[in-house]
Every structure is written in structure tokens, then in C-alpha cells.
Amino acid sequence: MTAVLQGNMRTIFANYPHIRAKFLFYSMPRRATDKKLPAVRRTSLSVVPFDGLGSPSYGKVLSTARLKKRSSSLIFVAAVTFLAGCPAVPPTKIRQVPSVPATETAGTAALTARIDAVLASNLTNRQLSPDTQGAWQILHGILAYGRDFKLQTSQGNVVAIDYILSGGAVKGFDLRSGDRFERAADRSTNATAAAVAENPTLTRGIRTELDPGTKLGQGHRDQWLAYLTACNLPIDQVFPTADGPRRLDLWLRQMEWDVPLNFEQEYSWTLMSLMPFRATTHRWKARDDNEYSIESLLRSELNRLSPESACGGSHRLVAIAITLNKRKAEGGSLDGVWADAQALVDLAIEQALEYQNEDGTFSSNYFERSGWSLDLSTAIGTTGHTLEFIAVAGSDELQRNEAVVSAANSLCRLLEQTSELDLECGALYHALSGLKIYRQRIAVTAST
């Protein structure tokens, strides 16, 4: 680990004691009994003292030979069809597809063509229907493909976001009218105050129900809008609700007003929803009459990041990175919470690359410790979520790093091998989202 990253870790540990506690706990190798072990870190063949700030190579208990043997057998592993999964057409067997050598550079035509082929194949051959799948599956598809994502309906294939905006029924996508915001004015049409007061479209917010764990409704606060922003919606976009049409700008206002009702204090999707429309200096009053800000939500996310966070903390890290990127684009200062965010992002990238497996996949334990899984959906999900974060957070130079190129190739290989199998939609579409963002990043770096 570099001296810079050691400094970052010391800063993080000093400002966020809970992260140090979790870092020390989760850096220890685990037994089947899940008991705490002495403070040691394990390399492939030896055990050495662990001081909490050394090179984060602990947990690697498999030798290189075993890793190679393990990765070579991946293609023969049967995949499990998950409830409400994302179907392939038609399901038959895993195809044996050779991987592209990891020594290729990210700017070569072979890698970009491979990613394009994987993205196109999964867009065309995996068809979701509102008659079969729920909002949780469909909104993940929109996250990955935006306006290109289509649904299979009785009227034929329809663009998913257009289907939703036209009032098409999707199980679990339940929007209802929220609070009245009297001061909301339709500046785009210069409507009079009286006209605004009489029109609930311009004064009422939008609320969404939380339905965690069902893989049907919204699993996290503000998740739906966060994923719909992939469609680059205008701020005056009108959504149909159970109580009539309501506008996106009032949805955002309702989201801000209801921050005190986010009892889970999980603001990842709140930040992702706000960043396309709000400056990082934005502040507001909420229903508890307290003032909140983008910085206060970011600080909360830093405070609550842990291995127990959704998908190993990858969603929180993506939200932190998106907010940090917006700050940089604005030219704002990177001190205080922004410096802490940058240090934590750098550390997470370092951990992800440190724990990367021999076959190019990222750890099945995300940023916590090393790990490799026989389950194809798990490998796709963990590698996809981690690549999604690195593609959002990493520098242009990092995107062309051999380790990241290897991860992109490995993810393509896994998706090629499972192209004719049903897959769990969260893992699938976050992997495809990661590849899409990564493809965009390397296209930019190749042209500069």
C-alpha cells in the first residue's frame, strides 16, 4: 500500500472511528464458527502480524495454484434460476467462450467490441414483461440501459420509460401524491400564482412506498428516482400517480422534505437522485424544521459505510463517488467532508484491486476481504457492482490499468457463459451498468 493511502487510512480512522473498528474486525480471517481471531493477517502461505495499517493482503488463504485450478473449473458450474429472474431466450446450456487476454489495453477494438456485444446481447435476448416481472426487475433494467430498455407487452415491445410515463401498470411501482408545496411555481411557463395554487400537478409532491426484501417493490429509499435518472429526464417531467399527474421537481422537493423520515438513514439513492438537478452547495429545510444539505447527507453516508451496507457497501460508494464527481465538475473546494470522501474512495479502490482474484473477478466479499464464489450469479453480482463503482470513481488512467481491464474481460466472460441462462436481475443489470459506464470511460480516454 502506498504512503498516500496509508495517510488516507489514518485520516479516515481518525474521523470515522466506526470504520476503523469494522476494518479491523473484517480484516481478520474468519473460521466456520465465525468467532473472532487474534489480530493476524494471512497471506497465501504464511501468517504475519497485522497492525491495521499494513498492506491489506489479509484473508488470502488460497495459493495461486489453487486459485488457477478453481477459476479453470468455473465454466462447468451449474447456474441457479432465481425467482423473478431475468430470462434468457431460449435457456439451454452454458457456452464455452474463451476469455480475451488481460494484457490487452482498454483502448483496443477487441475489448470495446466485446463489451458492445455483451451489452447488445443482453438487451436483445433478455426480455422483461410487466405481466411477469415487477418494478424491482424493470427499474434495474432501466438503470443499465436507460431509454434503450424495452418491455414486452401485449402491444409489442415498448420503451420502458415511455410505458411508465404513459401510466402503464408495473407491479411495485406505486406513486402517490405527497405534500403540498405552496411556493412551487411553474417558472417554465410563467404561470400565475393562482393557476399554480389550483393545479396539484404544480404543487403536490410524489411519494413512493418502501417494500424491502420483496424483489418486487422499492427496496431502498428513493431508489426508483435514482434509477430513472439514467433516462436523463427533464426536471419538469410529469409522472402519473394514483392521485393524478405530478412533476419531477416536486418529487425532488418531497424527497428533501422527507429526509427526517428516512429512518434507515440510507441516503445513497437520495444523493443519486439529487445530483443531476442540485448543486453540491444545495441546502434546504425539511419537515422537522431542520436544515439539511448535500454535505450533511454525504457525511452521513461516510459515517454509515460498512461491510453490512447493501451489496458490501458498493451502493454507498457509488453515491459518494457520484457526489464527489459533481463537486469536482463544479470546481468546488475538496476540503473537509470532500477530502474524507476522496480518501475513502481511494481506499476502497485500493482494497478492491488488492482482493481481486486470479481469474480477474473481484472478491465475492466486495471490499471486506478476499473471496471467490462457485455461484455464477454471485460472481457476476460482486464483480459487476465493484466494476460499476470503479468505473464511476476511478481516474481515466485507472480505467486502462491492466487489473481493471482484466476485471472487465472477466465480467464479459461470465455474461457470455450465462447468456442462455436466467439470472437474478439485480446482479445482472448492475453488471451491465458497470460495463456500460466502463465502456463510456474508456471511449473518452481513447479519444484524448
Image (cartoon, grey):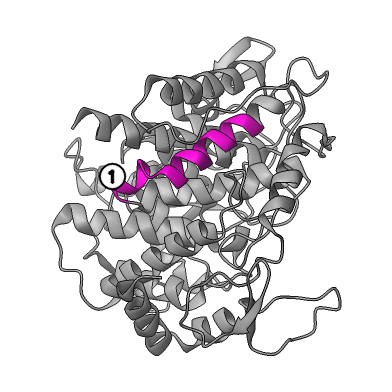
| Residue 308 screen position, x and y as percent | 64, 70
Query: Main SS of the magenta segment?
Result: helix
Quick check: can you spot residue 285?
no
User: Residue at (32%, 53%) from the top-left corner?
Assistant: 275
| Residue 106 screen position, x and y as percent | 38, 33
Q: Looking at the figure, which quarter contains the N terminus?
A: bottom left
Find the magenta span and give its range. 395-414
Residue corresponding to mark 1? 396
User: Residue at (86%, 78%) from the top-left corner?
Assistant: 33
Tell whether 197 sits left or right of 216: left
Q: Looking at the figure, which quarter contains the C terminus?
A: top left
| Residue 194 screen position, x and y as percent | 25, 47
User: Residue at (30%, 73%) from the top-left corner?
Assistant: 4
Residue at disc 1, secondary structure: helix
* Badge 1 density bin: few <14, some 14–19, many ≥20, Cα 10 Å: some
The front one of 291 and 98 is: 98
Q: Is residue 93 magenta?
A: no
27 versus 432 height, above or below: below
Quarter of the view holding residue 48: bottom right
User: Residue at (64%, 84%) from the top-left corner?
Assistant: 40
The front one of 71 and 332 is: 71
95 versus 448 height, above or below: above
Q: Is residue 412 magenta?
A: yes
Quick check: can you spot residue 223?
yes
The front one of 152 and 81 is: 81
Which residue type does callout 1 highlight? Asp
